[in-house]
Amino acid sequence: MSASEASSFEKILIESNDQKRSVDLRGGIVSIDYYEDILSPTVTAKVRVIDTGNTVIKKETGDEIRRGLYGGLPLRGGERIELKIKDQGKANLEGKEKVGLNFSSDQTLSLYVSSVTQVLQETQRESFLLNLVSREAITNETSRVYKRYENIISETVKKILTDPLIGLNVDKSKLDDIVEPTKGIYNFLGNIKKPFSVLVSLASKSIPDKSGGATAGYVFFQTQDGFQFKSIDKLISEKPKASYTYKEVNESSITRDDDFKILKFTVDKNQDLVENLRMGSYVFKRLTFNPNTFQFKQDIHSYNDKNKSSKKDSMNHLGTEELKFPKLSDDAKLTLDKTPTRVLAQVVDIGATSDISQKPNYEIDNYLGQNIMRYNLINTQNLSMTIPCNTDLRAGDVIECRFPNISREDDQEFDDLTSGNYMIKELCHHFEAKRSFTSMKLIRDTLGFYGGES
């Protein structure tokens, strides 16, 4: 069966807050949308339901009365939903079977109702939209980080994820797969911040535990597999999870072969030069003040500076084409990557409640330029794309996309500039009664058909 056809709703069960009533929602589902994003610490979902009013049985004064789900369960927020959906087709060209969405094995993997919106009630039916979040999203609003931490950032992240007082309750046996090792001691106070705020902040300061390389800059996010604390450089260096091709017709007129066909796509952004200049993606000036030594320092970080650790040659890239920069003017000798377009003023972080030391808390001189350039350059090219449903894809995965060459004089089948590897920034699995598909936001830093290290 084609991946675009209806998926199997194996289990969609909602449980009341008092755990006395549960209702099977499969008969009233209009649509389900499930979301992941590398910039979001929690997965979310939207479930649209139509109810005919005979769903919940309640005993009142000895008689059994059937009521609608909204008032009968009742829906007030916080209800647990077990969700298990199996989509059709194969996960990749090698014929791997799909696992599907599964938030039903235990309470820690269930989704919870954060709000109920778009409620429409009539005499014979009612409809509403259930907005769902993970359990950890609710825990994040009820806990705070109080402690002082002085360790490698990756070890601090592991402590926060497993601290019973914080309540994220991540399985310790899975930490090595979740958290990519970092280097450099970072000393700070929790300051009663929410866990997600602390973890996202730590991600922006993290440096992979490997020698050299312009690789600073992590992301903290959640997928159906759980939390991920990974560097952008590592994510984009992974092998493609699947390969998709844009073509106007099926390969065969007899059998459907659409599982790896790009249904539609649009280029949302490609080389926004003015925005990149504004953000200092190519070159910026940094001004720093050390409150311990009263030393003022300024230096320039450039994408093309061979003498800096932030140099382009150390970065992993999704494409192969070199960035080329125009001159400042027709008569100028300097190009846009030689003149600072952004100025950053910062106070050197010496550390929280630590002994006075000449050594900064964070290696700002070597790595600040890396994370600024890494975060900005990864968004050089943005695509929106829709494909047949594939629940084996995750935010942060790399996929290969092949787009046709529109030149009539070139015999090459695919465009070697727009085709290539892209990283999934965000995705949405959409399920309806008769069809299923996956829509994605894809990003990459350079053009070119073949990925890998430059």
Image (cartoon, helix red, strand yellow):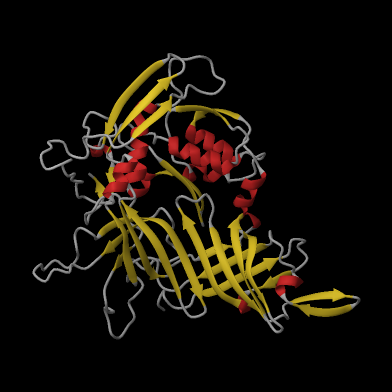
In percent of the image, x 46 and y 77: which residue is there?
435
Q: From the viewer's perspective, tell me whether residue 183 is left or right of residue 169.
A: left
Q: Is residue 263 above or below residue 180?
A: below
Quadrant for the N terminus, please. Answer: bottom left
Q: From the viewer's perspective, tell me whether residue 219 is left or right of residue 275.
A: right
Where is residue 414 shown, x and y percent of the image?
19, 65
In percent of the image, x 26 and y 78: which residue is there?
251
In percent of the image, x 51 and y 34: which residue is there?
155
Which image quadrant is residue 314 in? top left
Q: Is residue 9 above or below residue 282?
A: below
Where is residue 232 shown, x and y percent of the image?
38, 45
Total marks shown come to: 0
Where is residue 248 shown, x and y percent of the image?
27, 77
Residue 60 shows up from this direction: yes
**Front position in the image: 219 or 178:** 219
Q: Residue furthest right?
A: 61
Quadrant for the C terminus, please. Answer: top left
Which image quadrant is residue 23 in? bottom right
In percent of the image, x 43 and y 55: which residue is there?
395
Residue 233 shows up from this direction: no
**Front position in the image: 245 or 40:** 40
Where is residue 389 shown, x and y percent of the image?
43, 70
Q: Is residue 318 above or below residue 251?
A: above
